[in-house]
Amino acid sequence: MNDEDEILLCIECAKDIRLKKLIQIINTKGFCTCCGNTKYIIDIYSNEFIQMTKALIRYHYSEWDYNEHWGGNGYTSLFYEDDNVFFNKQNFKDNEVYDELIDRIACFEVYEDYDKGVSIFAGYYEGEQNPLLQSIKSSLDYSIIEIEDKLKNENYFKFEEKIIQILSEYSEICKSKIEKNSEFYRARIGYADSKRSILGGGFEGEIIFQPYSNSEMGAPPPNLAGFGRINRAGVSYLYCASDKYTAISEIRPHPGDIVSIGKFIANKELFIFDVTETQFLKFYHNDESLYKFKKLNTFTELMQKVIPPSERQAYNITQLIADCARKLKFDGILFPSSVGNGENLVVFNPEYMNYTYENAEIVEIKEVKYEYFKRQCTKDISEIQ
């Protein structure tokens, strides 16, 4: 492959959900140079790809992770890590094509004007080193995190005005329309009834299950509504997922559990406060926009934060965000799932969604997989300075 040869990357060779969504929005089909298939593609020399790639480095990694002056191995090394978050390397025709792609990324401009593009190094100002760049996903807005901490000891309504003010800054950007007749899914452990079938000759056949349906699959009445990520106890919202797998994942079943799955359809046009990964596409173009993304990303990170059952008081902040979104006349909230690959939709008025028996299913959980990473530990905590 010559240096001047065009490289087109397809949606299947992209790995990060934000890059996939960008390729989806560009909506151009063509021949993928990387895998040889005809899919939706992006030109790697387009400004969209250049700025998105650098923005994703900034999103996932802090500068000290890759800056060679601070112990890193260079930002191109990030594309070769075992948990590479950028591209599906196994899709590429061969290593040579992948290496060529990374070599060309290495030629991208690393310093850009604040309002013109994305820089991946902090650089210097008047001879002094600027503070190293912290990853966007870990650089949360202090004013929101401070409220989260204060909610442990203070009433939520003291902070409604502040959260409404912040949400209002993004209300037009994050207003997402759910079209009438859009489909979402709910799952519930258990089933309404079961009966073993009888085969010819009196032999027993399989057990046939009747899934939960209608009100059994819908939102609980207020008197039965417990404490949730978005709702306070005694408040009934309808939690849905964009796909069946995410719906199942959200109820955290165990192997051997029988699960009912139901479909819900929007009976009217809904306006939702959207904090999914799609919002990144409105901010990735330059450093100035990425800075403005900080508060919105804080809401996203809080919404999708994995919370153990023993620490559900951490839902105080997400419940407050939902309260304020409702006061801003939104019909619900759309946010990334913390356990599945899809998205969660919470509708404040359950009557806006109708259950349909179409595609009702019963599934049995075969296995549950866990991902983990090591945390630092010590035999004696008193030794820590």
Image: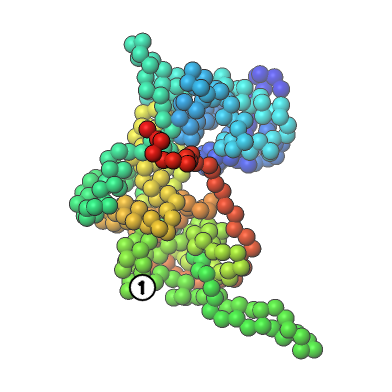
* Quadrant location, the N terminus: top right
Question: Residue furthest toward the bottom?
Answer: 202
Residue at 32% x, 74% y: name it: 223
- Relative to residue 54, is residue 214 depicted above or below? below
Question: Which of the 4 image quarters holds residue 106?
Answer: top right
x and y, in percent, of residue 40 in the image: 61, 40
> Disc 1 marks which amino acid?
Leu
Residue at 67% x, 83% y: name it: 196
User: Could you say which is closer to the camera, residue 3 or residue 122?
Assistant: 122
* Quadrant location, the C terminus: top left
x and y, in percent, of residue 135 in the image: 43, 33
Q: How does the figure colour the protein chain or chains? A: rainbow
83 vs 170, left or right, is right
Question: Is disc 1 placed on a helix, strand or loop?
Answer: helix
x and y, in percent, of residue 372 in the image: 54, 46
Using a 10 Å C-alpha cutoff, classify the residue at mark 1 as few (fewer than 14 neighbours), some (14 to 19) or many (20 or more). Answer: few
x and y, in percent, of residue 225 in the image: 36, 69
Question: Residue furthest toward the top?
Answer: 127
Residue at 40% x, 50% y: name it: 303
From the image, tell me which residue sits under label 1.
224
- Relative to residue 329, is residue 383 depicted above or below? above
269 vs 32, left or right, is left
Using the rendered image of the protein, determine whether residue 222 is visible from the camera's viewpoint. yes
User: Could you say which is closer to the camera, residue 183 or residue 261?
Assistant: 261
Residue at 40% x, 35% y: name it: 384
